Image (spheres, coloured by chain):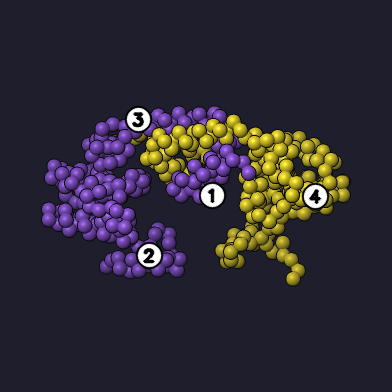
Chain colours: A purple, B yellow
Amino acid sequence: MISSFDTLKKILRRIPGIGYRSAERIALFFLLEGKEYAQELLKSLSHALESIKICSLCGNLSEAELCFLCSDPSRDASTLCIVETIPDLHAIERTGNFRGKYQILNGKLSPIRGIFPKNLPLEHLKKRLDQEDIQEIILALGNDIESEATCQYILKEILQPLGKNTTRIGFGLPSGGGIAMADTDTLHTAILSRRKL
Amino acid sequence: MISSFDTLKKILRRIPGIGYRSAERIALFFLLEGKEYAQELLKSLSHALESIKICSLCGNLSEAELCFLCSDPSRDASTLCIVETIPDLHAIERTGNFRGKYQILNGKLSPIRGIFPKNLPLEHLKKRLDQEDIQEIILALGNDIESEATCQYILKEILQPLGKNTTRIGFGLPSGGGIAMADTDTLHTAILSRRKL
């Protein structure tokens, strides 16, 4: 059809969550906006790529050695939230309710995909627990088997031996979700996670 | 927070259908993919911007004077489908069921937004109807007041005087949509659009 258009769409489809239609919509927008937008996007992306690195403490994006969260003295340094990815950290930050610090694992245990304990920053985590005055660790990993295994491993190998107070985020019905609309797994977890009133 | 990251997100949010979360997801993907992806995207976009222009007949994207649809002799030249935008044309093409030709209006009548008949390519449409052997015109505009006004104007001012056989695409329940889930407007249109069985 239009080969340069198809190439552009293929490149955009590599973005997670961007399917055929979204890629086409974005590609059309790029084309109809013309060179000015393309140059602005490129300039901004180049600038971000040059200036943004990984925070040496938590693994978040940062323009400095330490990210704005790790270097913020008003954050509660006694609570450490362990997440799998950078987007997970950003999602929790959007709630505006968590005021502690973070540790990003950049993965979860998955023997099938060749991810073992040595591939996660667990030595770094031990060092942090040793050097910082962390009172509570929140395991904010997802509701799937690999996340479960990762939480169990971290709990038993690292946190329990240190006697650390550990919690895991709640699972159950999403906000606004009705019982009849929930899938079986969610409902199963919601029943298991029931709380006394 | 991270200014270069925020700038990048703001630029991405200008894409239609891309909200706060999607912009963040795309920006994070761009950053984590690094320079290689950015260069590939830029190269592909620059190439597309240089090579793609607007088809002089129908208004579609094209690498040549005429787009691949207008220059395809196997398409049914006796049926002309009038759409509002380039993405609309692409959406109809994805169904794979329409084998006729197209005319893109690049807008619809909207006195509020200053779009009048003279702003639409209606003289071009008249010329096409005069020069081409078009037997049926399908008005494939949306289900809103401005689309309705545009269809009525084209019908009464251009197509009826020429005695052209004109149809408008069907409105009603979407595929897979249940009665109880449909909004009031859709259901109202669906009842008005009922067909004898």
Relative to B162, B79 lies left or right: left
Instruction: Name the residue tied to disc 1.
Output: A20
Where residue B30 sits, quadrant-wise, is: top left
Relative to B48, A117 lies left or right: left
> Which label was assigned to residue B78?
4
Q: Nearer the viewer, mark 3 or mark 1?
A: 1
The relative height of residue B146 versus residue A151 in the rendered view (above or below) is above
Helix, strand or loop under label 1: helix
Identified by mark 4, the residue type is Ser
Query: Image point 26% across, 45% down: which residue?
Result: A102
Give me the chain letter of mark 1: A
Identified by mark 1, the residue type is Tyr
Q: Do dots 4 and 1 share one subunit? A: no
**How far across and how far down the image is residue A42, in percent?**
47, 31
Residue A17 in view: yes
Identified by mark 2, the residue type is Thr
